[in-house]
Amino acid sequence: MDSTADLVAALRPVREPMLTLPELAADAALAFALGIAVALLLAVLLRLVFSRRMTRQEKLDTEILAAGALSPDERLLALARIARDCGVEISNIPGLSQALYQPGRDFVPDALEAAVRSHRAKA
């Protein structure tokens, strides 16, 4: 009876098929695509980590500036929402509540904007 070593020695070597050019190209394309995907994911994560956050005052300035481009009624409503979010007491601004509930009235929202800006300066 043959020993295990003799049986292993009698085995033929394993023949793996050679990779063809299309298979090599597919592997290279897959590796390239995975590299691009990892690079994009890394770029997004780094951007989230190192991006500069807007300060509260910068955000407020941006919102006020955006409200300036609206129609007078929409601007008034936008400024009232900004004032509410900032904690500005708007009940002492004369004519504001009538202008909010009756659109089209002659109310200049500059007083409300000034109140928001002055409250921002105090904060």
Image (tube, rainbow, N blue to C red):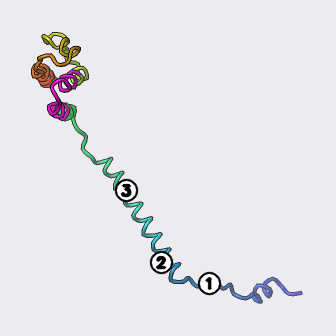
Picture mark count: 3
Q: Which of marks 2 and 1 precedes in the sequence? A: 1
Instruction: Classify residue 120 as left or right of residue 35.
Output: left
Give residue 38's position: percent from left, percent from top: 41, 60
Give residue 82's position: percent from left, percent from top: 22, 25
**Residue at the spot 45% in from the left edge and 72% down from the top edge:** 29
Q: Check the picture and name the quadrant holding the N terminus.
A: bottom right
Disc 1 to disc 2, C-alpha distance:
16 Å
Q: Quadrant of residue 3?
A: bottom right
**Residue at the spot 45% in from the left edge and 64% down from the top edge:** 34
Q: Which of marks 3 and 1 precedes in the sequence? A: 1
Residue type at the position of mark 3: Leu
> Quick one: label 3, few (<14), some, or many (20+) residues within 10 Å?
few
> Quick one: label 1, few (<14), some, or many (20+) residues within 10 Å?
few
Give residue 15's position: percent from left, percent from top: 66, 85
Determine whether label 2 and label 3 are within 8 Å by CB: no
**Of helix, strand and loop, which mostly describes the magenta segment?**
helix
* Residue 53 versus residue 1 in the image, above or below: above
* Residue 11 versus residue 111 in the image, above or below: below
Nearer the observer, 103 or 87 = 103
**Label 3 sits on residue:** 42
Q: Judging from the image, what secondary structure is the residue with disc 3 in? A: helix
Q: Which residues are magenta?
A: 61-80
**Which tag is nearer the camera, tag 2 or tag 3?**
2
Disc 1 to disc 3, C-alpha distance:
37 Å
Residue type at the position of mark 1: Pro
Q: Which of marks 3 and 2 precedes in the sequence? A: 2
**Residue at the spot 42% in from the left edge and 69% down from the top edge:** 32
Q: Quadrant of residue 62?
A: top left
Residue type at the position of mark 2: Ala
